[in-house]
Image: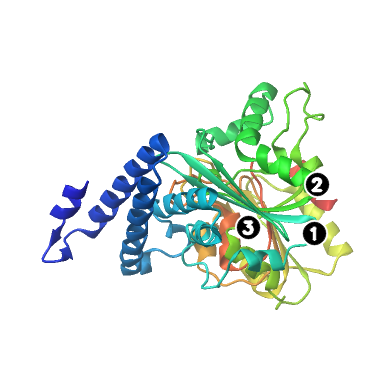
Amino acid sequence: YQKSLDVNIENDSIIHLYTYINTLKWKGWNLDIWYNKTKDIALLDKSINDYRQNVNYWNTYYNRNLDKNKGKNDGYKTSAICKLSVSLAKKYLITQDSIYLKESFEFSDLIKYTNFSDLKFNIKDVQSILKDDEAFVQNVTSSHPQQELIFIIEKNEVHVILNEDNPYHLSYDHQKFLYQFEDLDLFKDWSYKMYQSKFKKVDSILSLKGITDVTISNSDFNAMLNYDILIGDTLSNNWKEQPYLFHKYNFSYALCVRSFLESRSKKASLPVNLGLTIGDFENDVDLRFSKKLIKSLESNYSSSLAGFFNNLETNNVVALVAHGNSQYTNKEGEIRTSVNRTFTVDDIFDKELSNDFVIVTTCNSNASQMNHSEGASGNFSKAFRYAGAKSTLTTSWEIDDKSNAFIMER
């Protein structure tokens, strides 16, 4: 690897920056594996040094291409920053030196949404806004070697969990096993595997402390993972009696630490009003139950009926009922508001929003293909939150008009 790096330098200049970045990453990766076998801390230090260089060079490369990298395309494609965060956490666990903890946590967030905001942050900033029964969980997954790092931030304490035992992640073609609700055995298998890999150790810590409100910033490898429907054991043989985690915890999700801090400090700037939008499908699959829902909401709440983008600009709470064409195999999500009108996540990423709550009841509005460098970059929950909406409600499966109207009214 060193020979490859040397060949790429001419007159003290790097000839091909992207090749140099990848070679540095591979060198660090091999040092990582070597350290894991021998536990020689000098090898860990060398890998940290290579990853640091890699991240610095990546910043140069990334900023040169900034115009192409807004929002959904701002992932660190070489993934070295994930490896650096994990390696620094290893150093912290060995030395208990809080400098490594601070660095590891900060890099863990810069993996996600490089351009989100320039908000300064650290662990104490997160702790300052947490209540006694609340925790923030930050997940990072690093590949080659596959390792997962979990920070559990409580008001007065920090826990660091390192999972090096082949942590599971859900590829987009496996999402259907967790969200299809047809084959109970298949659901139980995947739900319990994900619980063991992602939450079992976290669960034991939170249970001991009596914490019930949990905000999670998922790793990109599990960008659409719904912790509510993970199960703590596989003993029950019917759907209703599964030990779903939503019986025990109130889960929320954040894009990253910066978005969590921003959403907690953000002041409402739009009128306190419910804006309603329903798609026009007279000559298509009509939403007849949702039409009744909209009339009910209009009569029971201070609400107005308008076009969706106008609603976003004028109301602090916005609800959209329409048809969604998103799938877990699609690169980006798509919503159809009439036979001829469609918009995609790209139309949302580019906006500047300040809504308190955006509700999107269309099929699969939280679904999109997952990329290891960018996560589920094409789903509407991410797009609305990136654009500035404080909170969202989206769907992880194909929804039925009648049951959707029933649930939403309640």
**Residue 15 as seen in the image, left or right of residue 325:** left
Residue 107 in the image: state x and y as whole percent.
48, 59
Mark 1, residues whose alpha carbon is within 10 Å: few (<14), some, or many (≥20)? some
Q: Are marks 1 and 2 in contact (CB under 8 Å)?
A: no
* Residue marked by disc 3: 254
Can residue 350 be seen in this snapshot? yes
Please tell me which residue is depicted at 54% across the width and 33% down the height of the picture: 174
Q: CA distance from mark 1 to mark 3?
A: 19 Å
Q: Answer above or below: position of 156 versus 324.
A: below
Please tell me which residue is depicted at 24% across the width and 55% down the height of the picture: 20
Splitting the image into 4 quarters, where does residue 259 fall? bottom right
Splitting the image into 4 quarters, where does residue 236 fall? top right
Mark 3, residues whose alpha carbon is within 10 Å: few (<14), some, or many (≥20)? many
> Element type at marker 1?
loop
Q: Earlier in the sequence, mark 3 or mark 2?
A: 3
Q: Amino acid at mark 1?
A: Asp
**Residue 360 as seen in the image, left or right of residue 341:** right
Task: Name the residue furthest right.
Answer: 300
* Residue marked by disc 2: 407
* Residue marked by disc 1: 132
Q: Which mark is residue 171?
A: none
Please tell me which residue is depicted at 61% across the width and 43% down the height of the picture: 225
Q: Earlier in the sequence, mark 1 or mark 2?
A: 1
Q: Are marks 3 and 2 in contact (CB under 8 Å)?
A: no
Residue 318 in the image: state x and y as whole percent.
71, 64
